[in-house]
Image (cartoon, rainbow, N blue to C red):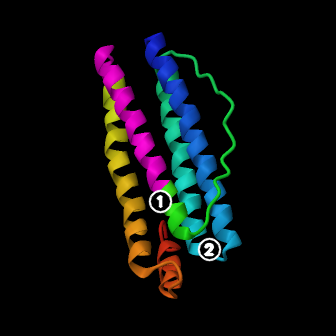
Amino acid sequence: MISKTIEQALNTQIQSEFFAAQLYLSMAGYCYSQNLKGFASWMKLQASEEREHAMKFFDHIVDRGGNVELHAIDAATPKLKSPLDMMRAALAHEKKVTGQIHKLYNLAVKEKDYAAQVMLQWFVTEQIEEEAQAEEVVKKLELIGEKSSAILYLDKELGKRGS
């Protein structure tokens, strides 16, 4: 049986994961408006992963006899100036999520919830990958510059993700 403290914290994280999915879909929309279909594809895959993350938390709560409570999700309409600005925002968001996961893990340790610790370990590892992927794109954009035609090559490369 899951404690109410852990259940509530995981329900909050479900909301956060669905917000992230909406944020990345919003960023995909921006990419389409800039005719950067590879970047858009990358962001849509990110959104899909965030929905999967939300469902991992959902299933964990259900499997442990808890109650899932879905809450309203804030609008995700970032004001983006460029692909670099967008990727920096994505990286900042992933760092925020990493902090949330670490807090959840610390709570699970405090509550001696070993099942939650095991589940959250997957997320700790996942966040390393999430941050690394976003940071790699940021660094490439910083290297090539925002007005370089090399951005078209990067767009094509990002479009291959998941293929």
Residue 93 image point, x, y percent? 48, 48
Residue holding disc 2? 37
Residue 134 image point, x, y percent? 42, 60
Determine the residue located farthest toward the bottom in the rendered image: 149
Q: Residue at x 52, y 44 (%)?
A: 52
Q: Amino acid at mark 2?
A: Lys
Most common secondary structure along the magenta stretch: helix
Q: Residue at x 56, y 73 (%)?
A: 38
Question: Label 1: few (<14), some or many (≥20) within 10 Å?
Answer: some
Provide the secondary structure element on which disc 1 rests: helix
Residue range of the region highlighted in magenta in the rendering: 90-114
Residue holding disc 1? 88
Residue 155 vs residue 75, the one in the foreground:
75
Residue 34, quarter of picture: bottom right
Q: Is residue 115 visible?
A: no
Q: Is residue 156 visible?
A: yes
